[in-house]
Amino acid sequence: MQEYIEEIAKSSRAALPEFEKRKTLSFEDVKEYIKHFAGEIKLKNTEHSEVRKNKDGTFIIFLNENLSEEERIKSALHELGHVFLHWESVPGVDEEGLALNDADIIDLKEVSATYFVRAFLMPKFLFLQSVFESTYHNICNYKKISQDFKVDEYNVISRGKDLNLWE
């Protein structure tokens, strides 16, 4: 499953060549990117982020208007992960939330969407390059990598684990 998500993140990011080699993306970049795939982002007073599909095949990502830019980026990409990985279970705009009763399936979908965020924000090639540039005497500087990609250190460590670079 991880290889599949890696490929989806890589090929979807490559759809807009101006983003492919960049280490950081702004929220405006993410909005433009989502628009490219027939989606839009709406900010509203909501507790959780969610994605809904329209009958015409487009989709809307609803984000909490109080999120920081970094959290908006991660939340928007997480919801986009659901679009790319689980389109069939994305509810319609006028439907209730997920109609699944199986918590394990929901958890797997959430984990895979979160993996997509890391793979998208820290593409394998750029991440490996950053790890190489940030490692001295076999000690990796996670903080430098987190600054390179504008993500927190937890996500850097998780991405390294995703790629089997460390335990």
Image (cartoon, rainbow, N blue to C red):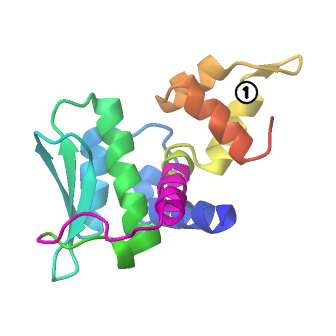
Residue at position x 34%, y 34% in the image? 71
**Left or right position of 97 against 89:** left
**Left or right position of 65 against 161:** left
How far across and how far down the image is residue 152, in percent?
51, 25
How far across and how far down the image is residue 109, in percent?
49, 61
Residue at position x 39%, y 41% in the image? 74
Q: Which residue is mark 1?
A: 133
Residue at position x 40%, y 68% in the image? 101
How far across and how far down the image is residue 148, in percent?
54, 27
Q: Is residue 103 magenta?
A: yes
Magenta residues, dominant SS class: helix
Front-most of residues 18 and 12: 12
Which quadrant would residue 1 be assigned to in this image? bottom right
Front-most of residues 20 and 110: 110
Q: Pointer 1: residues within 10 angstroms few (<14), some, or many (20+)? A: few
Residue at position x 52%, y 54% in the image? 116
Front-most of residues 91 and 60: 91
User: Which residue type carries mark 1?
Assistant: Glu
**Outermost residue to the front:** 101
**Left or right position of 125 against 116:** right
SS class, disc 1: helix
User: Is residue 16 visible to us here?
Assistant: no
How far across and how far down the image is residue 11, in percent?
52, 67
The span picked out in magenta is 94-116
Q: Is residue 121 magenta?
A: no
